[in-house]
């Protein structure tokens, strides 16, 4: 009988236990919903909870952790299944065989720098301070085969009114292990919705504190981050993919002792402004990292490579598309307070082993002028080697094609500790002058029909003082007819004069300037120098032409006579020879000898000479060498009051005799020059022409042929 009752009692107890085991998950579910806010800090909703006692598998469905207002959803999932090994916990080993989560949804909201999980952080951090360390054996944690399917994570920035979403997350974490006495490992990998993945692995030693983390990202779509670039750039479009593979090695107990190395890169990057016009793009940018440690202010980079960069630079209304697009960052920079950096850390160090820009293109459009201007720089390359903060002098090199034809080579060197100390040397070859027609027509009123330019410039700046040597060679230049222009410069004639026997123009233009002067700008200095050169060339054409025939520039200015002098002397013949030679060597050159003579002054000299010859015939003396006797002689012939020698000679001489001699002298000068020119060149086009005697240009001049040059029309 007793045995029977014992079996009954045991059976009842077994049924009670079975019932309790069956009801336990539901009781736990109800308690979680009832006390969730007290236990975990948030209201909990859980539709179902099951536990398989044979496999130690927990299955939860319809889970929601609400927002702090108990309304919206913070974290939720459709199904969570966890396979545990609870008996292992008796030996301080916590083992999870697998975890499967389907339909995970998380929503992170930021409002004025506050996140929707800040209350949870405060709760758990305060509880962590009160936890006492266990005196048992060191714990070990082993988490295997964690799988997340069809997950969604949203990051909502209410200030930017933007949502960053990761949809259809399929995440696999093969293993996370943590051993309080040995090496611990963790790894995670999940795939992005479009393509690519993120993978992270961590190894750590609790005893030594050493850790090694590796992070790999493949094809992270940048377009979803466009809204977060608003603080720096107002873009209409930003596309591209981020890739990286780097390691972080350090020590948990010495947080400053870490090293980041590896590489990071962007591919197929493209950006546009608000109007949909391209700004900046490149096919690939890759940065090789050697040692990055922001705490120690150490930045060591092995290589930076940018392939096929493209820049579309548009100028309009005294601004540009880049200034408009990057206005937010420029405004921020303008409000920054400049602090004295004399006490900054001397340990700051940066180094870039090599920087390469390959096969770039820059399109320039200028809509500020009377007509749109378009220019293309292609096949742009740029290189820097051994760039570092402790270098004394750094050299860089670049090349590019100018508008499909011109070739530019550049060497730019600078002091990294004094950036305005620099050397800028460059050469330009085969540059088409017609590329500048928009500006040449606007400023000087003429287009370039043909012409190539070769330019060599060497500029040095030290302590804000600039010295620049510029050599300019222009070949086969021809300009069109002048029409308008802001500056009335005789550029066509100036270029004609500057051409040598081969039709080339060679100019040496030295420039100086002080950059402490805010008005010192390279462009205006070059333009001012060129403008002055053109003006001086036209004002004194003999200076430009003299070298062509080996003449003294003064000999190409005028052929001068003394009063009463008509002889074609050797020196005057030499001047005529140079003019004839110029006529041959400078086709298209028009030469005119404009005769000027102060008629009154020469007639005065003729009157004195007539009386002087009378004096010589009677006194047998040269009147020029016996002037006082001559003056007394003239005075003795004068009737009435004596005035002066010249006036008295005019009164004593017949006017018709003076006029006849004046005309004869003029005729002899013209005839001798014309005869000499025709005798030495039967094809000469040199013109002899007299200025109207009434013209004030004659005043005070002895007989002179003023040599004038022009372009033969």
Image: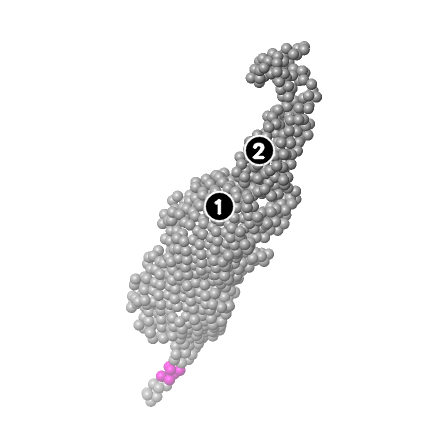
The quadrant holding residue 702 is top right
39 vs 2, nearest the viewer: 39
172 vs 354, nearest the viewer: 354
Residue at the image position 52 percent from the left and 58 percent from the top:
281
Give the x, y percent position of residue 705: 62, 31
Judge whether 593 appears above or below 98 on screen. above
288 vs 103, nearest the viewer: 288
Give the x, y percent position of residue 527: 55, 42
Judge whether 51 appears above or below 589 on screen. below
The reply to whether the magenta stretch includes residue 14 is yes
Task: Assign the C terminus to one quadrant of the image.
Answer: top right
Specify the label residue 457 is tagged with. 1
For marks 2 and 1 on the same chain, the one whose residue lies earlier in the sequence: 1
The span picked out in magenta is 9-15
Judge whether 676 appears above or below 133 on screen. above
The answer to whether any part of residue 486 appears in the image is no
The quadrant holding residue 671 is top right
* Left or right: where 252 falls relative to 244: left
Specify the label residue 254 is tagged with. none
Residue at the image position 47 percent from the left and 42 percent from the top:
468
Specify the label residue 573 is tagged with. 2
Q: Main secondary structure of the magenta part?
A: helix
Depth check, mark 2 against mark 1: the one in front is: 2
Separation of disc 2 and disc 1 at Cα? 42 Å
């Amino acid at each position: 009988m007793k045995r029977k009752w014992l079996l009954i009692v045991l059976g009842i107890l077994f049924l009670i236990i079975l019932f309790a085991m069956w009801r336990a998950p539901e009781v736990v579910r109800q308690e979680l919903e009832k006390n969730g806010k007290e236990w975990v800090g948030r209201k909990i909703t859980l539709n179902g909870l099951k536990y398989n006692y044979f496999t130690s598998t927990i299955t939860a469905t319809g889970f929601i952790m609400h927002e702090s207002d108990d309304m919206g959803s913070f974290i939720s999932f459709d199904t969570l299944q966890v396979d545990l090994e609870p008996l292992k916990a008796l030996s301080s080993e916590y083992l999870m065989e697998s975890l499967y989560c389907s339909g995970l949804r998380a929503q992170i909201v930021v409002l004025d720098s506050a996140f929707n999980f800040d209350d949870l952080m405060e709760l758990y951090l305060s509880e962590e301070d009160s936890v006492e360390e266990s005196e048992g054996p060191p714990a070990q944690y082993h988490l295997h085969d964690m799988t997340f399917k069809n997950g969604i994570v949203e990051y909502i920035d209410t200030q930017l009114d933007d949502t960053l979403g990761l949809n259809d997350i399929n995440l696999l974490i093969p293993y996370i292990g943590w051993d309080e006495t040995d090496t611990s490992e963790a790894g995670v990998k999940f795939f992005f919705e479009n393509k690519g993945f993120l993978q992270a692995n961590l190894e750590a030693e609790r005893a030594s504190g050493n850790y090694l983390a590796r992070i790999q990202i493949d094809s992270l779509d940048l377009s979803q981050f466009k809204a977060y670039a608003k603080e720096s750039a107002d873009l209409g479009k930003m596309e591209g993919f981020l890739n990286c593979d780097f390691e972080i090695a350090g020590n948990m107990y010495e947080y400053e002792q870490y090293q980041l190395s590896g590489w990071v890169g962007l591919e197929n990057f493209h950006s546009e402004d608000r109007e949909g016009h391209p700004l900046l793009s490149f096919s690939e940018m890759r940065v090789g990292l050697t040692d990055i440690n922001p705490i120690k202010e150490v930045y060591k980079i092995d290589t930076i490579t940018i392939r096929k960069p493209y820049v579309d630079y548009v100028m309009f209304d005294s601004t540009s598309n880049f200034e408009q697009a990057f206005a937010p960052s420029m405004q921020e920079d303008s409000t920054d307070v400049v602090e004295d950096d004399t006490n900054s850390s001397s340990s700051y160090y940066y180094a870039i082993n090599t920087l390469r820009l390959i096969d770039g293109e820059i399109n320039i459009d200028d809509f500020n002028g009377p007509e749109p201007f378009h220019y293309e720089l292609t096949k742009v390359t740029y290189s820097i080697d051994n760039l570092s903060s402790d270098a004394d002098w750094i050299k860089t090199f670049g090349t590019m094609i100018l508008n499909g034809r011109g070739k530019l080579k550049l060497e730019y060197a600078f002091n990294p500790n004094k950036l305005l100390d620099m050397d800028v040397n460059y050469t330009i070859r085969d540059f088409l002058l017609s590329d500048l027609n928009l500006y040449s027509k606007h400023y000087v009123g003429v287009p370039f029909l043909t012409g190539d330019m070769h330019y060599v410039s060497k500029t040095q700046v030290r302590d804000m003082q600039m010295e620049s040597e510029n050599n300019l060679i222009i070949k086969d230049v021809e300009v069109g007819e002048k029409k308008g222009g802001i500056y009335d410069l005789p550029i066509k004639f100036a270029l004609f004069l500057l051409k040598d026997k081969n039709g080339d123009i060679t100019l040496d233009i030295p420039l100086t300037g002080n950059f402490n002067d805010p008005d010192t700008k390279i462009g205006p200095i070059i333009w001012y120098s060129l403008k002055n050169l053109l003006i001086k060339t036209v004002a004194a054409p003999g200076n430009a032409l003299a070298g062509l025939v080996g003449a003294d520039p003064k000999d190409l200015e005028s052929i001068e006579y003394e009063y009463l002098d008509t002889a074609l002397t050797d020196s005057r013949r030499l001047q005529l020879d140079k003019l004839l030679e110029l006529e041959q060597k400078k086709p298209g050159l028009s030469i005119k000898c404009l005769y000027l003579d102060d008629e009154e002054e020469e007639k005065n000299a003729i009157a004195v000479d007539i009386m002087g010859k009378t004096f010589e015939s009677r006194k047998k003396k040269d009147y020029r060498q016996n002037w006082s006797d001559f003056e007394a002689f003239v005075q003795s012939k004068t009737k009435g009051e004596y005035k002066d020698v010249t006036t008295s000679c005019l009164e004593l001489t017949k006017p018709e005799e003076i006029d006849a001699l004046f005309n004869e002298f003029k005729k002899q000068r013209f005839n001798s020059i014309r005869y000499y020119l025709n005798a030495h060149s039967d094809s000469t086009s040199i013109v002899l022409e007299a200025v109207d005697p009434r013209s004030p240009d004659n005043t005070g001049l002895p007989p002179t042929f003023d040599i004038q040059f022009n372009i033969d029309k």
